[in-house]
Each structure stands twice: as structure tokens, then as C-alpha cells.
Image (cartoon, helix red, strand yellow):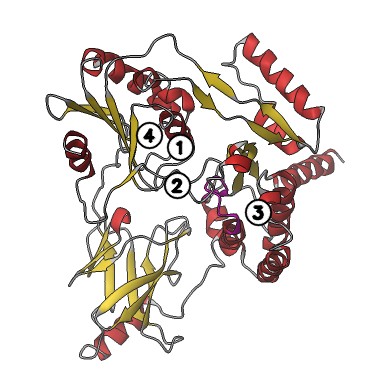
Amino acid sequence: MKKLIVLLFILLSSLAKAQNCNCSQNFEFLVGKIKANYVGYRDKVNKSNQQRFDLFTDSLRKVARSTEEADCRDICQKWLSYFKDGHIGMSSFTPGNAKDNDIRSYFAGTEKTGWTEDTFNSYLKNKVNSLDGIEGIWSEHAGKYKIGIVKDSASKKDEYMGFIIKADGIYWMPQQVKLCVKKTKDKYSLLSYRLFNHDNSNPSFYKSKDTLDFGIYGKWYRGNIPIVVVKPVKETDLSPSFRILDKETNLLTIPYFRIRYKKAVDSIIEKNKALLEQTKHLIIDVRNNSGGSVYTFEKLLPYLYTNPIYINGGSVLATEDNIKNGYDIDDVSFTESKKKEIKETAAKLRAHLGELYPLYSGETLRLDSIKKNPGRVSILINGGCASSTEFFILAAEQSKKVTLFGENSGGAVDYIEVISLKMPCNYFSFSYPACRSFLVDKRPLDNIGIAPNVIIPENVQDWVEFVRTYSTNP
């Protein structure tokens, strides 16, 4: 009897830990949660497009019913892409504590081909005089992965399929389809490319004689390459930098406003304080800065300030999911006063469940003094600027010193404060914003962005030099 109880306990524990990766059920979960909790939903789904949106959702719902687990993320991501919101999306595959066999099993149902290493080698031998230039065996630079690329017999077009011959044996197994390429005249273009975790990507692609260049994802070479030990790639350093351009102009480059770079940003401003207070012209380059925290740039604002700066507020969609996962959180690092503030905020929101509650009133930043220098501030912006970087731009553009140069920013500032929820299939989570900026009703920027004062022509390669000479010789 005791053994039976123990076995029953083990079984129940296993069931409790089990996850549901059925695609149809995960898709329905996602749709329900986004409809209930995404603060931009009511703006983006309305009478004018409701029918079209429902048809789109139903079409994916049907696909999800017959989709393998490993391909479900693509279906969910496609549905989320309807909202065109830079703060909404699916996470990549995250195995957590999953065992190798679990990962192997999860990806077992992905697209496969009938080609094997033996049949492909026979094909290469028999067709040696009629092979296309891309057909053959290709190996990535470390030699751990090997693929065969062959004319796709299922397609009437000039399309070629790349399938696994050798891989890690966990995420990828022989015969699984890794990529698809299309040939137009003598040029090749990438139709699909699966990353190590099977995420579908669209990297840059170029084929030379014996090399396939996938941009940031590396190069593949024709033939077999011995396995070599590859040193781990260090994370890209996105620290700020400061440079003197001429006797009147300095350049401050800030690639990222993530909170971990706040110390570096504060430090570089303090270190160059004397130069900043003497320079006539400061160029601030925030191109491709995708955001982070507004606290990271707070020490920079006094050097831009000429008059009070208005900072827009916003309303939070008060749902239990949003409150629990974004506004009623606890952390051992929080001070008692911070914990008290969080509890008070959560209580306010719970008192207005189901409402769009104006949690943040707009406020005006007033400083005691105006710095004489820098006399002029030029800020370089482009489509890669988003989120908190756009908050910086919105604050900076109110200054009489500031001129914006470049192209429109990314337009990901209307809906903010990202919430993350786990899917029933715990390998994945999804994120969405819960706060709606007051800007939406006054100056919507979603997928529009902040326009520069001066557009830099497309043929200009060196934006910094353009701004430097523009400012001295307008």
C-alpha cells in the first residue's frame, strides 16, 4: 500500500509539472490574454477593421489546430505581428531545466526531407556535371554543423532546400530542413533560415564561390571542415563614448539606455564635465538605441535644458494579470519605502479593475539654472531609436538648444511598461505593454516616430560629419 501511495505521489507530481504544448490551446490562450490585457488592443482593433481582424485570427486558428508543437511559435508570432507594436512579441525557445531528450522530442516534428547523407552523396556523384552552384555540402566555421543544399523537387520554381546532415543531436537532427534559398537569374536570396532554436529568421545573405554569408549568423563553407574549438563570443560592448571632433565640437555616443549602462553614462558625463561646459557644439548620437531606462539619461538633461520640459503621463489597463505581473511585485533589493509605494500602486489599480486608470499624471521638469554651454546640441536619430530613447528625444526636442538630425524614430513609445506572461507550454512566454501614453490622443507616434528637424539625405554616408559641417556652415 505504501508503495502504491509513493507511486501515486510521483505520478501526481509529474502531472503537476507537465506542460501543455498543444498548439491550438496555446494559440487560444495567447489570443484571450492579449484581448484582455494588451492596452493597445482597443485602439488597434475597432469597427473599421474588426471583420478583417476576425478573419485573420480565424485563419491562424485553423492552422494552429494542425500545427506541430515546434512550429507553433511562428503561428503565435504571426498573430501578434498584426498589432505592429515594438513592445509585443513571443520569446525564443527557452528550455529551462528540460533534459536533452525533452528538447529532442519537442523539435522532432519539424519539417523534414527524405534526403539522407548517403542518398545525397550519390546524387552529387551522379549529377556532378549538372549541379547548380549552390548545391553541395556546406559546413559552418566550427565544423559542428553540416548541411546539404539540393534543388527542391517539391517546387516548380528555382528553389533550393538546405537540410541537416550533421548537427548537435539535440536541437537539430539529420534530415531536418534548416533553410530555403531562391535563385533568380544568377542571384540567390534567402526565403527562410532557422536559428539553433528553430526560430525563423531573415538575416542578410550573400553567396560567393565557396562561401555562404549569413551576416550576424556567420559563414558556411563548401565541403567538410574539421571540428575546431571556438572561443565563446563576448557580449557586444554598448558602453557610451566621448570624442573631441574639433575645437568647437564634441561627440557623445550612447548606443543603449539599458539601466546597466547608467553608471557608464553618468561616469562619462562627469569625466568630461569641463569639456561639456566649454564646448560650443555637442553632437549626441543615439542611432539604433532601442531604449532601456529613462534613468540612464537623467544626468544628461541639464546640458540640454533651456526651459521647463513637459513629460507626458499615461494610463494603465488595470487587470489582475497586469497588476500581478507588473505592478504588485516584490524583490529583496527593494527598500521598505519602495515596497510600500508598490503596494499602494497595486491597491489603486485593484480599486479600478477593468478600467484604463490614469496612474501617471503628466509632470513638468524645472531646473534651477541654464548652462551656457554647450551652446548648440545636435541629436542624431534613426528608425532604430525606440522606447525610452524616444522619451529622451521627446524631452530634448523641447529645448531651444536642440536640433534633431536624421530620420524618423521607430515609433514605439505610445504603449509602454512591458508585462511578460508564461504560455501553457513553458518553453515560451509573450510580452505586451500595459500602459497607454497620453500622447496617443494628442500626438500619436505608433509606427510613425518622431520626425527630425533636419532630414539627412540618403546619399550621405557620414552622418556625424554632415552634422558637424552643417552646424558650422548652415
Residue beneath disc 1: 390
Cα–Cα gap, marks 1 and 3: 21 Å
Cα–Cα gap, marks 2 and 4: 15 Å
Of pointers 2 and 1, the one earlier in the residue sequence: 1
Residue beneath disc 4: 256
Residue 309 in the image: x percent, y percent?
Answer: 48, 23
- Asked if residue 104 shows in the view, the reply is yes
Residue 187 in the image: x percent, y percent?
Answer: 26, 77
Q: Amino acid at mark 4?
A: Tyr
- Asked if residue 423 shows in the view, the reply is no
Q: Please indicate whether residue 44 sits to the left or right of residue 209 in the image.
A: right
Crowding near the residue tagged with mark 2, few <14, some 14–19, many ≥20 C-alpha atoms within 10 Å: many
Of pointers 4 and 3, the one earlier in the residue sequence: 3
- Looking at the rendered structure, which numbered label has been put on residue 44? 3
Of pointers 2 and 4, the one earlier in the residue sequence: 4
**Mark 2 vs 1: CB contact within 8 A:** yes
Of pointers 4 and 1, the one earlier in the residue sequence: 4
Of pointers 3 and 2, the one earlier in the residue sequence: 3
Image quadrant assignment for residue 325:
top right
Residue 205 in the image: x percent, y percent?
Answer: 30, 65
Quadrant the C terminus occupies: top left
Residue beneath disc 2: 410
- In the depicted view, which residue is nearer to us: 126 or 374? 374
User: Mark 3: which secondary structure?
Assistant: helix
Cα–Cα gap, marks 3 and 2: 18 Å
Of the two numbered discs 2 and 4 in the rendering, the one whose residue sits closer to the viewer: 2
Residue at the spot 32% in from the left edge and 80% down from the top edge = 183
User: Mark 1: which secondary structure?
Assistant: helix
User: Mark 2: which secondary structure?
Assistant: loop
Q: Amino acid at mark 3?
A: Lys
